[in-house]
Image (spheres, rainbow, N blue to C red):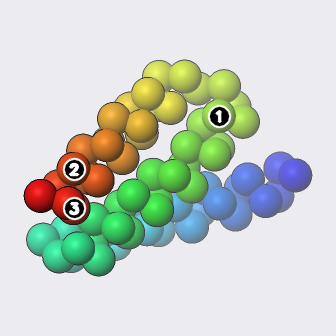
Amino acid sequence: MRYTITICAWIGAVCMMAAPFIIDYDEGKILAIVGLVLLTIQAAHDRLYHLICLNLVSIGGFSYALYI
């Protein structure tokens, strides 16, 4: 289980590192959302509630920017 969470966290981190370079396009926002979702899995497993809240607000913000 921990291995799967670690892989999700690394993939999420890579997505978040790539997203700023294409954030002006829809693909960049989607990549950021995917990265945050994957990082939220790790934060939830480790019970890091401040990061869960931060990620959820960020997901909401990117989703709003994606659909306006």
On the image, numbered disc 2 is attached to which residue? 64
User: What type is the residue that disc 1 sits on?
Assistant: Ala
The picture places residue 48, in percent across and down from the top left corner, at 58, 26
**53 displayed left or right of 41:** left
Name the amino acid type tagged 3: Leu
22 relative to 61, above or below = below
Position of the C terminus by quadrant: bottom left
Q: Relative to residue 44, is residue 54 drawn left or right? A: left
Pinpoint residue 25: horizontal percent, then vertical percent. Answer: 17, 76
Is residue 21 placed above or below 46 in the rendered structure? below
Q: Say if mark 3 contacts mark 1, CB within 8 Å.
A: no
Q: Are marks 3 and 2 in contact (CB under 8 Å)?
A: yes
Tag 2 secondary structure: helix
Mark 3 or mark 1: whose residue is earlier in sequence: 1
Q: Position of residue 6 (x, y in %)?
A: 71, 56
| Residue with the mark numbered 3 | 66
What's the distance in space between the residues labelled 2 and 1, CA to CA?
23 Å
Q: Is residue 37 visible?
A: yes
Q: Nearer the viewer, residue 21 or 58?
A: 58
Q: Nearer the viewer, residue 21 or 30?
A: 30
Label disc, if present, on residue 20 of the rendered structure? none
Instruction: Give SS at disc 1.
Output: helix
Q: Secondary structure at mark 3?
A: helix
In the rendered view, does 2 fall on the left or right side of 66?
A: right
Q: Which residue is mark 1?
A: 44
Q: Is residue 51 above or below residue 61?
A: above
Q: Earlier in the sequence, mark 2 or mark 1?
A: 1
Rendering coords of residue 15 (x, y %): 43, 68
> Viewer-proximal residue, 9 or 34?
34
